[in-house]
Amino acid sequence: MAERLKSDGKASDAASADERRSAFIRDLVHDLSTPLTPIAGYLTLLRGERMGPLTPQQRKAVETMAGAVLRLTRIVENLSDLASLQSGPSAIRAGPVHPDDLAEAAASEMRAAVLDARLHLEVRTAGGGEMMGDARKLGQALTSVLQNAVKFSPHGGEVLLEVSRDAEVVRFSVYDQGPGISAAEAADLFEPFQRSARPEELRRPGSGLGLPVASRIAAAHGGRVTVESPPHTQPASGSHDFNGSKFVIELPLRSPAEAPPPPPPAPAHASR
C-alpha cells in the first residue's frame, strides 16, 4: 500500500509539473504574440505598398523583416501547439484536406529558404482524394520536417518531398543529403528543446521544437513520425541518391465520408 501511495504521489507530481509547464508556455505564447501581431500587420501593409511605394533597397529590407517575422511566428505556433497537444487529440480541428495540397503548400512556404541554401526541392504528389485532418496543424508538421531537411542539407544538394498512399495510410516522406543522424541523437530527436551536441550543428539556428511538435501532431491524428538515417530504401524513381536522412509522417487515410459524425451539441439549460 505504501509503495502504491508513493507511486501515485509521483504521478501526481509529474502531472502537476506538466500543467505548470503548459501554463508557462501558454503565457509565453501570449506575451510573444501580442507585439508580433501588429508588426506582421504593418509589414503586410508595407509589402503591399499601401503606405507608399518602396524603393528596391526598402523592399529588400521589408522582405528580410517579413522572413524574420515568419520564422518567429512559426516558433510561437510550435510553442502553442506543444502546450495544446498536452491535452490530447481534443486540440485537433479535423476537416477535409488533400494530402497533395499540404505538400505543395509546405514546399511553397520553404521556397525562399531553399533558394538561399542553393538547394533543389522536388515534390512528388500521389493523387487520390481527400482525408480528414487539421489542415493548419498538419501543414505545420510537414513544414517543420521539411525545414529540418533544408537546414541540414549541403549547398547545391537535393531534397525530395514524396507523397504516397495505399488503402489505409498516407505517407509524406522527406529525403535529404545531409550529414545524417546518429542512433544516440535519434533517441532524443522528438523530445522538446533537444538539440544535437555536434559543434557544427550548434551553430545552426533552431528552437528544438519543430520535430517534437510534428511528432505530437501526427500522434494526435492517430499517426506517427519515423526517421531512417541513412534511408533504408531510396525513392522509386530518380537520378539522385539520398544518403542523409529520411523522415516519414504516416497518417491514417480516412476519407471525409468515413469520418465519425461530430458530437451532438450539449442540451440547452434554462436560465434561472
Image (tube, rainbow, N blue to C red):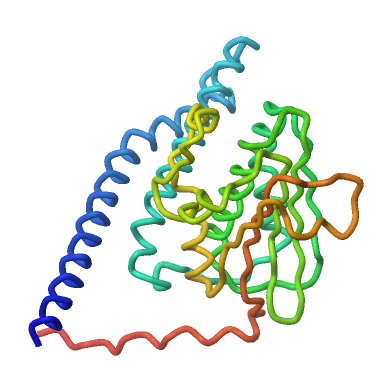
Q: Residue 168 occupies which quadrant of the picture? A: bottom right
Is residue 213 visible in the rendered image? The answer is: no
Residue drawn 26% across the image and 87% down it: 268
Nearest the camera: 21 or 14?
14
Is residue 42 visible in the rendered image? The answer is: yes
Task: Decide if residue 161 is on the left or right side of residue 190.
Answer: right
Q: Quadrant of the C terminus?
A: bottom left
Residue drawn 75% across the image and 81% down it: 167
Q: Quadrant of the N terminus?
A: bottom left
Looking at the picture, how far across and down is residue 152, in whole percent? 63, 37
Q: Residue 118 occupies which quadrant of the picture? A: top right
Q: How many marks?
A: 0
Looking at the picture, how far across and down is residue 163, in whole percent? 75, 61
Task: Decide if residue 39 is on the left or right side of residue 60.
Answer: left
Task: Tell me: residue 157, above or below residue 116.
Answer: below
Looking at the picture, how far across and down is residue 78, in whole percent? 43, 49
Task: Decide if residue 80 is on the left or right side of residue 153.
Answer: left
Nearest the camera: 48 or 157?
157
Nearest the camera: 147 or 52?
147
Task: Tell me: residue 96, above or below residue 213.
Answer: below
Task: Tell me: residue 9, above or below residue 36.
Answer: below
Residue drawn 77% across the image and 66% down it: 164
Residue drawn 64% across the image and 80% down it: 254
Looking at the picture, how far across and down is residue 262, in whole percent? 47, 83
